Amino acid sequence: MLKELEQFGLISVRNGYYDDDTLMIARTIVEMTGYGLEPRHLRAFATSAQREVGLFEQVVRPMGQQRGAESRGRAEETLRELAALSIRLHAALVQTALRATFGP
């Protein structure tokens, strides 16, 4: 299954091993397969995440290009905040769509 997840771009080996985030992704996908979803169905999640990263990169790149540790620290903090906001927005959008589809 790991090879299949790699083929669909859902996980990848980093520095010769799977890191903690990759293992969490794999475990979550395994749980989702219990509901009949297959890795190929979940490719949209990876595509969406890549698009978000591209958007965040546009915001943070100018900060990272400035000299000094303070600028890099500000860029890293901005990325953490954007990631948290992204997760919150995604959850709210899914909940709203589920209510519209299946009712309160």
Image (spheres, rainbow, N blue to C red):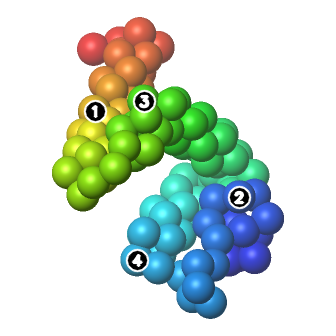
Instruction: Compute the Cα span from label 2 to label 1.
Output: 23 Å
User: On screen, 14 above or below 77?
Assistant: below
Q: Which mark is residue 74?
A: none
Q: Are marks 1 and 4 in contact (CB under 8 Å)?
A: no
Lower sequence index among marks 1 and 3: 3
Which residue is denoted by mark 4 in the rendering? 20
Lower sequence index among marks 2 and 4: 2
Which residue is denoted by mark 1 in the rendering? 85
Instruction: Compute the Cα span from label 2 to label 4.
Output: 17 Å
User: Residue 36 in the image: x percent, y percent?
Assistant: 63, 53
The structure residue drawn at horizontal position 75% and vertical position 52%, both measured from the top left corner, is: 40
The structure residue drawn at horizontal position 75% and vertical position 58%, both measured from the top left corner, is: 8
Q: Amino acid at mark 1?
A: Leu
Q: Please state which of the two labelled residues, at mark 2 or mark 3, is closer to the viewer.
A: 3
In the image: residue 53, left or right of residue 98: right
Q: Amino acid at mark 2?
A: Gly
Residue at disc 1, secondary structure:
helix
Q: Which quadrant holds the N terminus?
A: bottom right
Which residue is denoted by mark 2 in the rendering? 9
Q: Which quadrant holds the C terminus?
A: top left
Lower sequence index among marks 2 and 1: 2
Residue at disc 4, secondary structure:
helix
